[in-house]
Protein backbone atom coordinates (compact mmCIF):
# COMPACT_ATOMS: atom_id res chain seq x y z
CA UNK A 1 0.00 0.00 0.00
CA UNK A 2 1.16 3.54 -0.75
CA UNK A 3 1.46 5.97 2.14
CA UNK A 4 -2.04 6.94 3.16
CA UNK A 5 -3.24 10.52 3.34
CA UNK A 6 -5.78 12.17 5.58
CA UNK A 7 -8.71 12.92 3.28
CA UNK A 8 -12.31 14.05 3.25
CA UNK A 9 -15.03 12.63 1.00
CA UNK A 10 -17.12 15.75 0.64
CA UNK A 11 -20.69 16.55 -0.31
CA UNK A 12 -22.14 13.06 -0.67
CA UNK A 13 -25.10 11.15 0.72
CA UNK A 14 -24.05 8.33 3.03
CA UNK A 15 -26.10 5.12 2.71
CA UNK A 16 -25.44 2.05 4.85
CA UNK A 17 -27.48 -0.50 6.77
CA UNK A 18 -28.36 2.14 9.39
CA UNK A 19 -29.99 4.55 6.95
CA UNK A 20 -29.34 7.52 4.72
CA UNK A 21 -28.03 11.01 5.52
CA UNK A 22 -26.06 13.82 3.89
CA UNK A 23 -22.55 13.79 5.34
CA UNK A 24 -18.87 14.24 4.70
CA UNK A 25 -16.55 11.39 5.65
CA UNK A 26 -13.13 12.11 7.17
CA UNK A 27 -10.60 9.31 6.68
CA UNK A 28 -7.50 9.20 8.84
CA UNK A 29 -3.98 8.13 7.95
CA UNK A 30 -4.50 4.90 9.88
CA UNK A 31 -6.98 3.68 7.26
CA UNK A 32 -10.07 4.10 9.43
CA UNK A 33 -12.95 6.55 9.38
CA UNK A 34 -12.18 9.43 11.75
CA UNK A 35 -15.51 11.24 11.57
CA UNK A 36 -18.81 11.37 9.70
CA UNK A 37 -20.90 14.53 9.62
CA UNK A 38 -21.83 17.67 7.76
CA UNK A 39 -19.30 20.43 7.22
CA UNK A 40 -16.18 18.31 7.66
CA UNK A 41 -14.67 19.54 4.40
CA UNK A 42 -14.88 23.17 5.50
CA UNK A 43 -13.12 22.37 8.76
CA UNK A 44 -10.95 19.52 7.53
CA UNK A 45 -8.12 20.58 9.84
CA UNK A 46 -5.04 19.07 8.34
CA UNK A 47 -6.68 16.96 5.62
CA UNK A 48 -4.30 16.40 2.72
CA UNK A 49 -6.97 15.82 0.11
CA UNK A 50 -10.64 16.35 -0.63
CA UNK A 51 -12.54 13.91 -2.86
CA UNK A 52 -15.61 15.42 -4.47
CA UNK A 53 -18.74 13.36 -3.81
CA UNK A 54 -21.39 15.89 -4.80
CA UNK A 55 -24.35 14.11 -6.37
CA UNK A 56 -22.90 10.80 -5.22
CA UNK A 57 -23.73 8.06 -2.75
CA UNK A 58 -21.04 7.10 -0.23
CA UNK A 59 -21.46 3.51 0.92
CA UNK A 60 -19.54 0.64 2.46
CA UNK A 61 -17.40 -0.98 -0.21
CA UNK A 62 -18.98 -3.69 -2.32
CA UNK A 63 -18.23 -7.37 -1.65
CA UNK A 64 -18.30 -10.03 -4.38
CA UNK A 65 -18.89 -13.61 -3.24
CA UNK A 66 -18.05 -15.16 -6.59
CA UNK A 67 -15.05 -14.16 -8.71
CA UNK A 68 -12.77 -16.19 -10.96
CA UNK A 69 -9.28 -14.71 -10.79
CA UNK A 70 -7.82 -17.64 -12.76
CA UNK A 71 -4.53 -17.74 -10.85
CA UNK A 72 -2.82 -20.19 -10.64
CA UNK A 73 -2.90 -21.69 -14.10
CA UNK A 74 -5.06 -19.30 -16.13
CA UNK A 75 -2.98 -16.14 -16.09
CA UNK A 76 -3.57 -15.51 -19.81
CA UNK A 77 -7.21 -14.71 -19.00
CA UNK A 78 -6.81 -13.00 -15.60
CA UNK A 79 -4.52 -12.62 -12.62
CA UNK A 80 -5.23 -11.72 -9.03
CA UNK A 81 -3.76 -8.27 -9.74
CA UNK A 82 -5.75 -7.56 -12.92
CA UNK A 83 -8.94 -8.93 -11.40
CA UNK A 84 -8.49 -6.80 -8.29
CA UNK A 85 -8.04 -3.72 -10.49
CA UNK A 86 -11.35 -4.47 -12.22
CA UNK A 87 -12.87 -5.00 -8.77
CA UNK A 88 -11.96 -1.58 -7.36
CA UNK A 89 -13.07 0.12 -10.59
CA UNK A 90 -16.42 -1.57 -10.01
CA UNK A 91 -16.59 -0.40 -6.38
CA UNK A 92 -15.59 -3.73 -4.82
CA UNK A 93 -13.28 -3.61 -1.80
CA UNK A 94 -13.31 -7.38 -1.25
CA UNK A 95 -13.80 -10.40 -3.50
CA UNK A 96 -13.94 -14.15 -2.91
CA UNK A 97 -11.72 -16.02 -5.36
CA UNK A 98 -13.15 -19.32 -6.59
CA UNK A 99 -11.01 -22.49 -6.37
CA UNK A 100 -11.53 -23.86 -9.88
CA UNK A 101 -8.02 -22.89 -10.90
CA UNK A 102 -5.31 -25.15 -12.32
CA UNK A 103 -4.47 -26.77 -9.97
CA UNK A 104 -7.61 -26.45 -7.88
CA UNK A 105 -7.29 -24.64 -4.56
CA UNK A 106 -7.75 -27.76 -2.46
CA UNK A 107 -4.83 -27.56 -0.03
CA UNK A 108 -3.25 -25.23 2.51
CA UNK A 109 -0.27 -24.68 0.20
CA UNK A 110 -2.44 -23.38 -2.63
CA UNK A 111 -4.48 -21.23 -0.26
CA UNK A 112 -1.24 -19.63 0.94
CA UNK A 113 -0.14 -19.04 -2.65
CA UNK A 114 -3.29 -17.12 -3.57
CA UNK A 115 -3.34 -15.28 -0.24
CA UNK A 116 0.20 -14.08 -0.93
CA UNK A 117 -0.85 -12.85 -4.38
CA UNK A 118 -3.82 -11.16 -2.74
CA UNK A 119 -1.62 -9.23 -0.34
CA UNK A 120 -0.10 -7.38 -3.30
CA UNK A 121 -3.44 -6.73 -5.02
CA UNK A 122 -5.65 -3.66 -4.90
CA UNK A 123 -8.56 -5.08 -2.89
CA UNK A 124 -8.97 -7.70 -0.19
CA UNK A 125 -8.90 -11.16 -1.77
CA UNK A 126 -10.58 -13.90 0.24
CA UNK A 127 -9.86 -17.43 -0.91
CA UNK A 128 -12.59 -20.07 -1.29
CA UNK A 129 -11.30 -23.60 -0.81
CA UNK A 130 -12.49 -26.66 -2.71
CA UNK A 131 -14.89 -29.02 -0.96
CA UNK A 132 -13.31 -32.10 -2.53
CA UNK A 133 -9.83 -32.98 -3.74
CA UNK A 134 -9.30 -31.59 -7.25
CA UNK A 135 -13.01 -30.72 -7.19
CA UNK A 136 -13.63 -34.30 -8.32
CA UNK A 137 -16.48 -34.87 -5.88
CA UNK A 138 -14.99 -38.02 -4.38
CA UNK A 139 -12.79 -37.28 -1.34
CA UNK A 140 -13.13 -34.36 1.02
CA UNK A 141 -10.37 -31.78 0.78
CA UNK A 142 -8.49 -30.89 4.00
CA UNK A 143 -10.95 -28.19 4.99
CA UNK A 144 -9.63 -27.90 8.55
CA UNK A 145 -6.14 -27.00 7.29
CA UNK A 146 -7.57 -24.38 4.92
CA UNK A 147 -9.95 -23.03 7.57
CA UNK A 148 -6.97 -22.57 9.89
CA UNK A 149 -5.58 -20.13 7.28
CA UNK A 150 -8.78 -18.10 7.33
CA UNK A 151 -10.83 -19.76 4.58
CA UNK A 152 -14.51 -19.39 5.45
CA UNK A 153 -16.25 -20.44 2.22
CA UNK A 154 -15.80 -23.77 0.43
CA UNK A 155 -17.12 -24.75 -2.99
CA UNK A 156 -16.36 -26.98 -5.96
CA UNK A 157 -17.65 -24.17 -8.17
CA UNK A 158 -17.73 -25.08 -11.82
CA UNK A 159 -19.10 -28.43 -10.69
CA UNK A 160 -21.71 -29.49 -8.18
CA UNK A 161 -20.89 -32.20 -5.65
CA UNK A 162 -22.73 -35.09 -7.27
CA UNK A 163 -22.49 -37.74 -4.54
CA UNK A 164 -25.13 -37.11 -1.89
CA UNK A 165 -23.21 -38.99 0.81
CA UNK A 166 -20.08 -36.94 0.12
CA UNK A 167 -22.08 -33.73 0.35
CA UNK A 168 -23.65 -34.84 3.61
CA UNK A 169 -20.22 -35.54 5.11
CA UNK A 170 -18.92 -32.22 3.85
CA UNK A 171 -21.81 -30.33 5.48
CA UNK A 172 -21.26 -32.13 8.79
CA UNK A 173 -17.53 -31.41 8.66
CA UNK A 174 -18.11 -27.77 7.73
CA UNK A 175 -20.57 -27.34 10.58
CA UNK A 176 -17.98 -28.58 13.07
CA UNK A 177 -15.42 -26.13 11.64
CA UNK A 178 -17.78 -23.18 11.64
CA UNK A 179 -17.42 -22.57 7.90
CA UNK A 180 -19.96 -22.45 5.10
CA UNK A 181 -20.33 -24.59 1.98
CA UNK A 182 -21.41 -23.00 -1.29
CA UNK A 183 -22.90 -25.15 -4.01
CA UNK A 184 -22.85 -24.88 -7.78
CA UNK A 185 -26.16 -26.64 -8.35
CA UNK A 186 -26.07 -28.84 -11.42
CA UNK A 187 -26.82 -32.53 -11.87
CA UNK A 188 -24.22 -33.74 -14.33
CA UNK A 189 -26.32 -36.55 -15.78
CA UNK A 190 -28.99 -34.04 -16.85
CA UNK A 191 -26.66 -31.24 -17.92
CA UNK A 192 -24.15 -33.36 -19.87
CA UNK A 193 -23.68 -32.18 -23.43
CA UNK A 194 -25.74 -29.02 -22.96
CA UNK A 195 -24.55 -25.54 -23.90
CA UNK A 196 -27.56 -23.28 -23.24
CA UNK A 197 -30.98 -23.47 -21.60
CA UNK A 198 -33.10 -26.34 -22.87
CA UNK A 199 -36.23 -24.80 -24.31
CA UNK A 200 -37.71 -22.99 -27.27
CA UNK A 201 -34.50 -21.22 -28.27
CA UNK A 202 -32.23 -24.25 -27.98
CA UNK A 203 -34.65 -26.11 -30.26
CA UNK A 204 -34.70 -23.26 -32.78
CA UNK A 205 -30.92 -22.91 -32.78
CA UNK A 206 -30.10 -26.61 -32.77
CA UNK A 207 -27.90 -26.24 -29.70
CA UNK A 208 -28.12 -29.00 -27.06
CA UNK A 209 -29.74 -27.66 -23.91
CA UNK A 210 -29.50 -27.89 -20.13
CA UNK A 211 -32.90 -28.23 -18.45
CA UNK A 212 -33.86 -26.08 -15.48
CA UNK A 213 -34.32 -29.30 -13.51
CA UNK A 214 -30.57 -29.94 -13.60
CA UNK A 215 -30.23 -27.00 -11.21
CA UNK A 216 -33.44 -27.40 -9.25
CA UNK A 217 -32.95 -31.06 -8.29
CA UNK A 218 -29.61 -30.27 -6.62
CA UNK A 219 -31.09 -27.24 -4.85
CA UNK A 220 -33.84 -29.52 -3.47
CA UNK A 221 -31.31 -32.12 -2.40
CA UNK A 222 -29.08 -29.67 -0.58
CA UNK A 223 -32.01 -28.03 1.18
CA UNK A 224 -32.86 -31.51 2.47
CA UNK A 225 -29.25 -32.07 3.51
CA UNK A 226 -29.17 -28.75 5.33
CA UNK A 227 -32.28 -29.85 7.21
CA UNK A 228 -30.69 -33.22 7.99
CA UNK A 229 -27.33 -31.87 9.18
CA UNK A 230 -28.32 -28.50 10.57
CA UNK A 231 -25.46 -26.98 8.55
CA UNK A 232 -25.78 -23.74 6.58
CA UNK A 233 -25.50 -23.92 2.82
CA UNK A 234 -25.09 -21.13 0.28
CA UNK A 235 -26.50 -21.52 -3.23
CA UNK A 236 -24.45 -19.98 -6.02
CA UNK A 237 -25.75 -18.18 -9.13
CA UNK A 238 -29.37 -19.38 -8.98
CA UNK A 239 -31.06 -18.91 -12.33
CA UNK A 240 -34.54 -20.48 -12.39
CA UNK A 241 -37.95 -19.70 -10.95
CA UNK A 242 -38.07 -23.19 -9.47
CA UNK A 243 -34.75 -22.76 -7.64
CA UNK A 244 -35.87 -19.43 -6.22
CA UNK A 245 -39.16 -20.96 -4.99
CA UNK A 246 -37.32 -23.84 -3.28
CA UNK A 247 -34.96 -21.45 -1.47
CA UNK A 248 -37.82 -19.20 -0.41
CA UNK A 249 -39.70 -22.17 1.04
CA UNK A 250 -36.57 -23.35 2.88
CA UNK A 251 -36.06 -19.91 4.39
CA UNK A 252 -39.68 -19.77 5.53
CA UNK A 253 -39.15 -23.08 7.31
CA UNK A 254 -36.20 -21.62 9.19
CA UNK A 255 -33.33 -23.41 7.43
CA UNK A 256 -29.92 -21.73 7.32
CA UNK A 257 -29.78 -21.29 3.57
CA UNK A 258 -28.54 -18.27 1.65
CA UNK A 259 -28.46 -17.61 -2.07
CA UNK A 260 -26.87 -15.36 -4.66
CA UNK A 261 -27.79 -14.43 -8.22
CA UNK A 262 -25.55 -13.07 -10.96
CA UNK A 263 -26.38 -9.88 -12.89
CA UNK A 264 -26.66 -11.74 -16.20
CA UNK A 265 -29.49 -13.83 -14.77
CA UNK A 266 -31.63 -10.76 -14.16
CA UNK A 267 -30.61 -8.81 -17.28
CA UNK A 268 -30.30 -11.31 -20.16
CA UNK A 269 -32.44 -14.15 -21.54
CA UNK A 270 -31.66 -17.25 -23.57
CA UNK A 271 -32.85 -15.42 -26.68
CA UNK A 272 -29.49 -13.61 -26.58
CA UNK A 273 -27.90 -16.86 -27.76
CA UNK A 274 -29.70 -16.51 -31.11
CA UNK A 275 -26.64 -14.59 -32.32
CA UNK A 276 -24.43 -17.65 -31.64
CA UNK A 277 -22.14 -15.16 -29.90
CA UNK A 278 -20.26 -17.10 -27.23
CA UNK A 279 -20.11 -14.05 -24.96
CA UNK A 280 -23.66 -15.07 -24.02
CA UNK A 281 -22.62 -18.61 -23.11
CA UNK A 282 -22.52 -19.03 -19.33
CA UNK A 283 -23.07 -21.74 -16.73
CA UNK A 284 -25.77 -21.95 -15.46
CA UNK A 285 -27.12 -20.79 -18.80
CA UNK A 286 -29.20 -17.73 -19.53
CA UNK A 287 -32.84 -18.60 -18.95
CA UNK A 288 -36.20 -17.56 -20.47
CA UNK A 289 -37.98 -14.34 -19.56
CA UNK A 290 -40.19 -16.00 -16.93
CA UNK A 291 -37.13 -17.12 -14.97
CA UNK A 292 -35.55 -13.68 -15.26
CA UNK A 293 -38.77 -12.15 -13.93
CA UNK A 294 -38.82 -14.59 -11.00
CA UNK A 295 -35.25 -13.70 -10.05
CA UNK A 296 -36.07 -9.99 -10.20
CA UNK A 297 -39.18 -10.47 -8.08
CA UNK A 298 -37.25 -12.46 -5.47
CA UNK A 299 -34.62 -9.73 -5.26
CA UNK A 300 -37.35 -7.11 -4.84
CA UNK A 301 -39.02 -8.95 -1.98
CA UNK A 302 -35.74 -9.63 -0.20
CA UNK A 303 -35.80 -13.40 -0.39
CA UNK A 304 -32.34 -13.63 -1.98
CA UNK A 305 -29.22 -12.49 -0.15
CA UNK A 306 -26.65 -11.28 -2.63
CA UNK A 307 -25.77 -10.24 -6.13
CA UNK A 308 -22.47 -11.91 -7.05
CA UNK A 309 -20.82 -11.30 -10.39
CA UNK A 310 -19.51 -14.79 -11.28
CA UNK A 311 -16.82 -12.75 -13.07
CA UNK A 312 -15.40 -15.36 -15.47
CA UNK A 313 -12.71 -14.07 -17.85
CA UNK A 314 -11.62 -16.05 -20.90
CA UNK A 315 -9.06 -15.30 -23.57
CA UNK A 316 -10.20 -14.07 -26.97
CA UNK A 317 -8.96 -17.29 -28.58
CA UNK A 318 -11.13 -19.38 -26.28
CA UNK A 319 -14.25 -17.26 -26.74
CA UNK A 320 -13.80 -16.94 -30.51
CA UNK A 321 -14.59 -20.61 -30.98
CA UNK A 322 -17.96 -21.91 -32.15
CA UNK A 323 -20.68 -21.57 -29.49
CA UNK A 324 -20.66 -25.24 -28.54
CA UNK A 325 -16.86 -25.33 -28.28
CA UNK A 326 -16.34 -22.09 -26.35
CA UNK A 327 -16.05 -22.11 -22.55
CA UNK A 328 -18.90 -20.61 -20.52
CA UNK A 329 -18.49 -17.35 -18.64
CA UNK A 330 -18.54 -13.56 -18.89
CA UNK A 331 -16.99 -10.55 -17.21
CA UNK A 332 -18.91 -8.83 -14.43
CA UNK A 333 -16.90 -6.80 -11.92
CA UNK A 334 -17.07 -3.39 -13.59
CA UNK A 335 -20.73 -3.57 -14.64
CA UNK A 336 -22.51 -5.25 -11.68
CA UNK A 337 -23.43 -2.13 -9.72
CA UNK A 338 -24.67 -0.26 -12.78
CA UNK A 339 -26.71 -3.23 -14.00
CA UNK A 340 -28.42 -3.53 -10.63
CA UNK A 341 -29.17 0.20 -10.47
CA UNK A 342 -30.38 0.25 -14.08
CA UNK A 343 -32.41 -2.94 -14.31
CA UNK A 344 -33.84 -3.57 -10.85
CA UNK A 345 -36.78 -1.69 -9.37
CA UNK A 346 -34.94 -1.21 -6.10
CA UNK A 347 -33.84 1.76 -4.04
CA UNK A 348 -30.07 2.34 -3.81
CA UNK A 349 -30.06 1.07 -0.21
CA UNK A 350 -31.67 -2.20 -1.33
CA UNK A 351 -29.10 -2.62 -4.10
CA UNK A 352 -26.28 -1.94 -1.65
CA UNK A 353 -27.61 -4.51 0.80
CA UNK A 354 -27.30 -7.11 -1.96
CA UNK A 355 -23.84 -5.96 -3.04
CA UNK A 356 -22.22 -4.96 0.25
CA UNK A 357 -23.29 -5.80 3.78
CA UNK A 358 -25.25 -9.00 3.12
CA UNK A 359 -22.51 -10.71 1.08
CA UNK A 360 -19.95 -9.49 3.64
CA UNK A 361 -21.81 -11.43 6.35
CA UNK A 362 -22.00 -14.58 4.20
CA UNK A 363 -18.26 -14.35 3.49
CA UNK A 364 -17.53 -13.86 7.19
CA UNK A 365 -15.70 -10.57 6.63
CA UNK A 366 -18.27 -8.14 8.04
CA UNK A 367 -15.80 -7.06 10.69
CA UNK A 368 -13.96 -5.08 8.01
CA UNK A 369 -16.44 -4.80 5.14
CA UNK A 370 -20.05 -3.83 4.68
CA UNK A 371 -20.46 -2.32 8.13
CA UNK A 372 -21.81 1.13 8.93
CA UNK A 373 -19.99 4.21 7.65
CA UNK A 374 -19.01 5.36 11.12
CA UNK A 375 -16.03 6.61 13.10
CA UNK A 376 -13.62 3.83 13.98
CA UNK A 377 -14.65 1.55 11.11
CA UNK A 378 -12.17 0.51 8.40
CA UNK A 379 -12.36 2.97 5.51
CA UNK A 380 -13.44 0.48 2.83
CA UNK A 381 -15.75 2.72 0.85
CA UNK A 382 -17.47 3.01 -2.51
CA UNK A 383 -18.51 6.41 -3.89
CA UNK A 384 -20.74 6.28 -6.95
CA UNK A 385 -22.85 8.63 -9.02
CA UNK A 386 -26.29 6.98 -9.34
CA UNK A 387 -27.29 9.20 -12.27
CA UNK A 388 -24.19 8.86 -14.47
CA UNK A 389 -24.97 7.34 -17.87
CA UNK A 390 -22.36 5.24 -19.68
CA UNK A 391 -21.97 2.34 -22.08
CA UNK A 392 -19.38 -0.45 -21.75
CA UNK A 393 -17.06 -0.92 -24.70
CA UNK A 394 -15.38 -4.07 -25.98
CA UNK A 395 -12.04 -3.44 -24.26
CA UNK A 396 -12.95 -5.52 -21.21
CA UNK A 397 -11.91 -2.67 -18.92
CA UNK A 398 -9.14 -3.59 -16.49
CA UNK A 399 -9.53 -7.32 -17.06
CA UNK A 400 -7.04 -9.20 -19.20
CA UNK A 401 -10.06 -10.57 -21.08
CA UNK A 402 -12.78 -8.93 -23.15
CA UNK A 403 -15.76 -11.27 -22.89
CA UNK A 404 -18.43 -8.85 -21.75
CA UNK A 405 -21.94 -9.26 -23.20
CA UNK A 406 -22.90 -5.66 -22.38
CA UNK A 407 -21.01 -3.78 -25.10
CA UNK A 408 -23.03 -0.71 -26.09
CA UNK A 409 -25.71 -1.23 -23.43
CA UNK A 410 -26.87 2.01 -21.81
CA UNK A 411 -26.24 1.81 -18.06
CA UNK A 412 -27.00 4.16 -15.20
CA UNK A 413 -24.70 4.56 -12.21
CA UNK A 414 -20.92 4.63 -12.15
CA UNK A 415 -18.20 4.42 -9.53
CA UNK A 416 -16.34 7.69 -8.92
CA UNK A 417 -14.03 6.76 -6.02
CA UNK A 418 -13.07 3.54 -4.23
CA UNK A 419 -11.13 3.47 -0.96
CA UNK A 420 -9.55 0.30 0.42
CA UNK A 421 -8.19 0.54 3.98
CA UNK A 422 -8.24 4.31 3.61
CA UNK A 423 -6.25 4.43 0.38
CA UNK A 424 -7.98 6.08 -2.58
CA UNK A 425 -7.40 3.44 -5.26
CA UNK A 426 -9.97 4.85 -7.69
CA UNK A 427 -10.37 8.62 -8.03
CA UNK A 428 -12.76 10.18 -10.53
CA UNK A 429 -13.22 6.79 -12.17
CA UNK A 430 -9.51 6.17 -12.75
CA UNK A 431 -7.35 3.53 -11.02
CA UNK A 432 -4.50 5.18 -9.15
CA UNK A 433 -1.98 2.34 -9.42
Image (cartoon, rainbow, N blue to C red):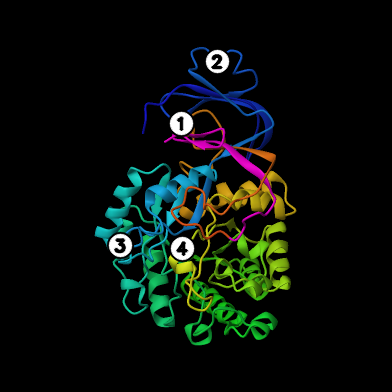
User: Label 4: which residue?
Assistant: 316
Task: Using the image, tell me which numbered label, if any, was put on residue 108.
Answer: none
Q: Is residue 364 visible?
A: no
Q: Is residue 304 visible?
A: yes
User: Label 1: which residue?
Assistant: 422
The secondary element bearing badge 1 is classed as loop
Q: How many marks?
A: 4
- The answer to which of 64 and 277 lies nearer the viewer is 277
Decide which of tag 2 and tag 4 comes sooner along the chain.
2
- The answer to which of 389 and 61 lies nearer the viewer is 389
Whole-number angstrom distance, CA of label 1 to CA of label 2 = 16 Å
User: Label 3: which residue?
Assistant: 144
Looking at the image, is 349 positioned above or below residue 200?
A: above
Q: Which residues are magenta?
A: 405-433
Image point (64%, 26%), residue name: 23
- The answer to which of 72 and 374 lies nearer the viewer is 72
Graded by Cα atoms within 10 Å as few (under 14), some (14 to 19) or many (20 or more), the crowding at tag 3 reads some
The secondary element bearing badge 3 is classed as helix
Decide which of tag 4 and tag 3 comes sooner along the chain.
3
Decide which of tag 1 and tag 2 comes sooner along the chain.
2
Check whether the beta carbons of the residues at disc 4 and disc 3 lie within 8 A of each other: no
Decide which of tag 4 and tag 1 comes sooner along the chain.
4
Check whether the beta carbons of the residues at disc 2 and disc 4 lie within 8 A of each other: no
Whole-number angstrom distance, CA of label 4 to CA of label 3 = 38 Å
For residue 372, side relative to residue 178 (left or right): right
Residue 409 sits inside the magenta stretch: yes
- Which of label 4 and label 3 is nearer to you? 4
User: Label 2: which residue?
Assistant: 44
Whole-number angstrom distance, CA of label 2 to CA of label 4 = 48 Å
Whole-number angstrom distance, CA of label 4 to CA of label 1 = 36 Å
Image point (51%, 20%), residue name: 49
Whole-number angstrom distance, CA of label 3 to CA of label 2 = 47 Å
Amino acid sequence: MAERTRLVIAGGTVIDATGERPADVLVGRDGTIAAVGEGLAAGAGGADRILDARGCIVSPGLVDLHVHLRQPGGEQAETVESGSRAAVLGGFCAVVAMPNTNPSIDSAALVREVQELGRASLCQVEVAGAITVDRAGERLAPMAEMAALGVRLFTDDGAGVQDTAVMRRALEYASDLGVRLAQHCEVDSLAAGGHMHEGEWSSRLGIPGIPAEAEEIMVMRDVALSRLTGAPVHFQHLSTAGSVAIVEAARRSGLAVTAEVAPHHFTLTDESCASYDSRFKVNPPLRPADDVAAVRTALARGSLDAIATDHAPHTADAKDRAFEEAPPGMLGLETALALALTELDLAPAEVLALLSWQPARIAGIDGAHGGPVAAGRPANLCVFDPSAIWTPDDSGGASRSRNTPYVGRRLRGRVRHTLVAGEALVVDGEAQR
